[in-house]
Image (cartoon, rainbow, N blue to C red):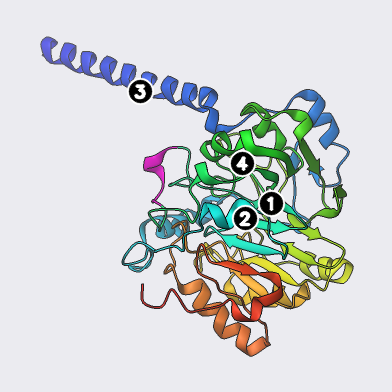
Amino acid sequence: MKRIRKIIKKMLVTIGILIGVIIIGGLLFLNLSPQFGGKHTEEAVTYFEKSQNFKDGKFTNKSPTKTSPSLKDIGKVLKVMTGGSPNATPSTPIKVEKVSKEELAEVSAVTKFVWFGHSSFLLEIQGKRILLDPMFGQVAAPISWMGSKRFSKELPVDIKDLPSIDAVIFSHDHYDHLDYGTIQKIKSRVKKYYTPLGLGTHLQAWGVKKEDIVELDWWEETKFEDLKLIATPARHFSGRGLSDTRATLWASWIIQSETENIYFGGDSGYDTHFKAIGDKYGPFDLALLECGQYNDDLPDYPIHMYPEETAQAALDVRAKYTMPIHWAAFKLNQHAWKEPTERIKKEAKELNVNLVTPKIGQVFTLNNLENSSSNWWEDL
């Protein structure tokens, strides 16, 4: 009996040591791994406190918005984690259109786009190259085993072949929009970064110079040479670790030239801000609006739009053409991977919304949007 107690005691000590090692290792990983980003200085927080969108040490949405599951919703969350559509990923990898180095050698005389899937774009406008939410990694997570791989085996443009980039615009700091590895690969050729309040802290931690970063609050405007950039509201949240939820702001963006008006919605649940943006800055030649990664089992968490809401948001912002984004690259929720575009096509027909659905990697221009669509996903 005495010997059994000794064995049990030894086992408990061993288990305790293992648990301690795991906890210490986890804490070291969270605090030392660069992909989690930086921490704000006291000076930065003092500056944030001037914003109407910063309360009690956190950024907030205009409307009350649940972003973290409550205890009563644990059952729903478990269902989300363990359920899902059998068609959540394509049956075969998505084949992307490849863009040659020659195509990118000179900036286009007309405004053109290349979609990388999800919410990432290369935009050429007024002689400048701009990246929108560039996320070129294979997994939208801090560790590779934590997420499913990108639906395509390659990108439309190899990162090493990207030309000089005049500006990068970020909507928020989630992993599917802001990627540490991508920043490390592109920062040597990027001149300027435009972000919502606080996101620059991550970029600085990753080696980007502070003077190359412009942070804006909602409704603030700035000039980028002959372009006007405007940070506008979104209904979402932020965070890269366990303790930094809503530590940085999230935003949508407007990119204006003298003759063109483009709206990049970032991530956002549906709300009245779309109409406010449309009333103040519309109509838009093209609106890039999220349409994916929603979950029908969690309707009380309005941080993403259902496809039918995306179509309504297109009307609210007064978009001449709308492109559904935030789909076709990663499995971040449980719906069938091509369901978002099928649902919005049906609703857009009802509401008379003009959709643009190019292939990933397809070069399309603002002056020829009506001829830029196909149902490329149908046979996958």
In terms of depth relative to the viewer, which is nearer, 296 or 249?
Answer: 249
- Name the element at disc 1: strand
| Residue at which label 2 appears | 122
| Residue at which label 4 appears | 239
| Residue at which label 3 appears | 19
Looking at the rendering, the stretch of residues picked out in magenta corresponds to 143-149
| Picture coordinates of residue 253, whole percent (x, y) | 75, 56
Q: Which-is-in-front pick, marks 4 and 2?
A: 2
How packed is label 2: few (under 14 Cα within 10 Å), some, or many (20 or more)? many
Task: Identify the image quadrant of residue 173.
Answer: top right
As drawn, 354 above or below 208 = below
- Residue at image position (61%, 75%) is 356
As drawn, 304 above or below 172 = below
Amino acid type, mark 3 = Ile
- Earlier in the chain: of badge 4 and badge 1, it is 1
How packed is label 1: few (under 14 Cα within 10 Å), some, or many (20 or more)? many
Q: Is residue 55 visible?
A: no
| Residue at which label 1 appears | 129
- Earlier in the chain: of badge 1 and badge 3, it is 3
Amino acid type, mark 4 = Gly
- 136 to the left or right of 63: left
Q: Is residue 220 magenta?
A: no
Q: Answer yes or no: do the residues labelled 1 and 2 have beta carbons within 8 Å?
A: yes
